[in-house]
Image: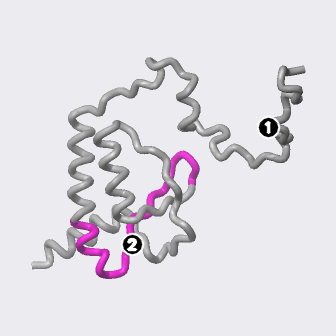
Amino acid sequence: MPRSGLEPSTVCGVSQDALPPDPFAGDPHDPARTLDDPPEVNELEPLSAEDRAEIVEDLSDLAVYQALLEGRGIRGVVVDCPDCGEQHYHEWNLLRASLRQLLEEGQMRRHEPAFDPDPADYVTWEYCRGYADAMLNAD
């Protein structure tokens, strides 16, 4: 028996079954996972010059897309996630912050998903690109 007098299946006197499920169970990006990893495992490959240039270009494009679409009621961009197969809704400022974080840190941290987004308020990156091309080349 452990020194605390509690069975291994209890935490602070509460049964493991009574605890809520771990929201990061099975997630390779679990922030707590890095606490036990040796430092060399946590090191990320630095972004290549090409990757950095693409992110800077995406940030520039995002500013144009927001300027053109926000006034029309579009709240942001929807992205098909290859990891989970679901759509993720990113408001303009959240997407900008994520891209900046990717540029500065080499990775994007997880964030809270949009709460009950209306799919009609979001468009794909491709839609943004096509809309911008049409608007800027209308002359």
Find residue 116 and report its horizontal and vertical position in percent: 57, 70
**Residue 97 in magenta stretch:** no
The residue positioned 63% from the left and 42% from the top of the image is 24
Find residue 96 and report its horizontal and vertical position in percent: 32, 56
Which residue, as the protein is rendered here, is positioned at the far front? Answer: 4
Q: Quadrant of residue 132?
A: bottom left
According to the picture, the residue beneath numbered tag 2 turns out to be 75
Residue 43 versus residue 64 in the image, above or below: above
In the picture provided, is 37 more to the left or to the right than 76? right
Q: What span is colored magenta in the figure?
A: 64-85
According to the picture, the residue beneath numbered tag 1 turns out to be 12
**Residue 84 in magenta stretch:** yes
| Residue 21 vs residue 128, the one in the foreground | 21
Amino acid bearing label 1:
Cys
| Residue 116 vs residue 55, the one in the foreground | 116
Q: Residues within 10 Å of mark 1 (few under 14, many from 20)?
A: few
